Image: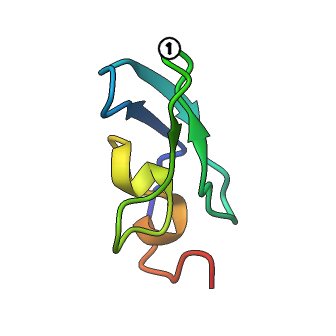
Amino acid sequence: MNVVLESTITCPKCGASKTETMPMDACQYFYTCTSCRTHLKPQPGDCCVFCSYGTVKCPPIQQNQSCCG
């Protein structure tokens, strides 16, 4: 299975988007919007900001593994 390591995060407050590289073996729980400086954290039920606001889920989820164990 090919794992996609880039995901575009879109800020729910201002709508700004930025493509970021995801870590292979860890969750990214916080993210600061580079446009409006809003601090994002995962929505309930998601493990990381990429799963909540990104175009691609985090690598562990893509591999059907537990994220953040």
Q: Which image quadrant is residue 29 in?
A: bottom right
**Badge 1 element:** loop
**Residue sitting at 62 percent across and 62 percent down?**
27
Q: What quarter of the picture does the N terminus occupy?
A: bottom left
As rendered, which of 64 and 47 lies closer to the eye? 47
Residue under numbered circle 1: 35
Where residue 38 appears, as percent x and y from the top left, is: 50, 31
Where residue 47 appears, as percent x and y from the top left, is: 48, 69
**Residue sitting at 42 percent across and 65 percent down?**
62
Q: What quarter of the picture does the C terminus occupy?
A: bottom right
Where residue 12 appears, as percent x and y from the top left, is: 30, 34
27 relative position to 18: left or right: right
Where residue 50 appears, as percent x and y from the top left, is: 45, 50
Q: Which image quadrant is residue 53 in?
A: top left
As rendered, which of 52 and 3 lies closer to the eye? 52
Categorize mark 1 by other alpha carbons within 10 Å: few (<14), some (14-19), many (20+). Answer: few
Q: Which amino acid type is marked by label 1?
A: Ser
User: On screen, 15 above or below 1?
Assistant: above
